[in-house]
């Protein structure tokens, strides 16, 4: 069924390299790995929709797409070491009893603001990681089985493969965001060129 459906496309851009060989084998149209759409814009281009920060004190942002006790433990240990409160975007309301400031109802505008102004970000979210990089924030991303392939691929693109944690005890290097954004600029340009080519085929 999939092989029949992909014949409806004039070109195919996919986020994961994993799919490129399969698609090239089953179609004759152009196929290319492209970056996530959230990276087609620069951080500056997101500025008009970002809310003004509501928090005056510094904080660690804990953004959890799925409960991970090791990730929570890491964030809480980091909170103690740095003397920073935890702002928590998750559905674990019980964390409020541990002193986390819960922001599970944050919309896009507040989410971007919370990422941009965080002192540190601990997440297992693909887009939590992406926007940490967009806004040049220190971060770690914890392994999440259903999401690891795309997280590992994009971290490799960034040159930040050591930023994915499993136990929370792994060592990693500091981030050279000039180099990271040089890599993103190249990938963004290639992806936009492919998108323009695709539109030209319509």
Image: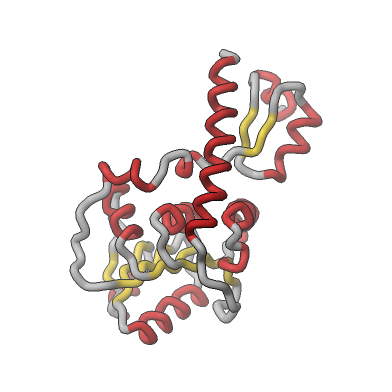
Residue 16, image x and y in percent?
65, 44
Q: Identify the image's colour scheme: rainbow, by chain, secondary structure or one colour.
A: secondary structure
- Residue 22, position as x, y percentages in the image: 77, 36
Q: As displayed, is residue 143 above or below residue 34?
A: below
Tell me the quarter of the image containing the C terminus: top right
The quarter of the image holding the N terminus is top right
Figure check: 142 above or below 40: below
| Residue 94 visible in the snapshot | no
Determine whether, in the image, residue 179 is placed left or right of residue 29.
left
Residue furthest to the bottom in view is 81
Q: Residue furthest top?
A: 202
Furthest-right residue in this view: 25
The foreground one among 67 and 48 is 48
Q: Is residue 196 visible?
A: yes
Q: Residue at x 53, y 31 (%)?
A: 192
Q: Residue 13, image x and y in percent?
A: 62, 32
């Amino acid at each position: 069924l999939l092989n029949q459906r992909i014949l409806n496309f004039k070109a195919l851009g996919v986020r994961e390299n994993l799919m490129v060989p399969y698609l090239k084998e089953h179609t004759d149209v152009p196929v290319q790995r492209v970056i996530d759409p959230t990276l087609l814009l620069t951080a500056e281009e997101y500025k008009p929709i970002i809310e003004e920060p509501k928090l005056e004190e510094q904080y660690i942002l804990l953004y959890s797409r799925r409960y991970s006790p090791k990730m929570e433990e890491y964030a809480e240990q980091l909170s103690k070491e740095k003397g920073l409160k935890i702002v928590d975007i998750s559905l674990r309301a019980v964390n409020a009893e541990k002193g986390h400031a819960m922001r599970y109802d944050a919309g896009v505008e507040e989410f971007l603001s919370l990422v941009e102004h965080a002192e540190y970000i601990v997440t297992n979210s693909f887009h939590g990681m992406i926007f940490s990089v967009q806004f040049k924030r220190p971060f770690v991303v914890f392994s999440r089985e259903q999401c690891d392939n795309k997280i590992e691929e994009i971290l490799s693109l960034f040159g930040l493969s050591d930023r994915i944690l499993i136990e929370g005890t792994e060592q990693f290097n500091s981030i050279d965001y000039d180099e990271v954004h040089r890599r993103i600029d190249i990938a963004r340009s290639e992806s936009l060129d492919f998108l323009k080519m695709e539109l030209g085929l319509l």
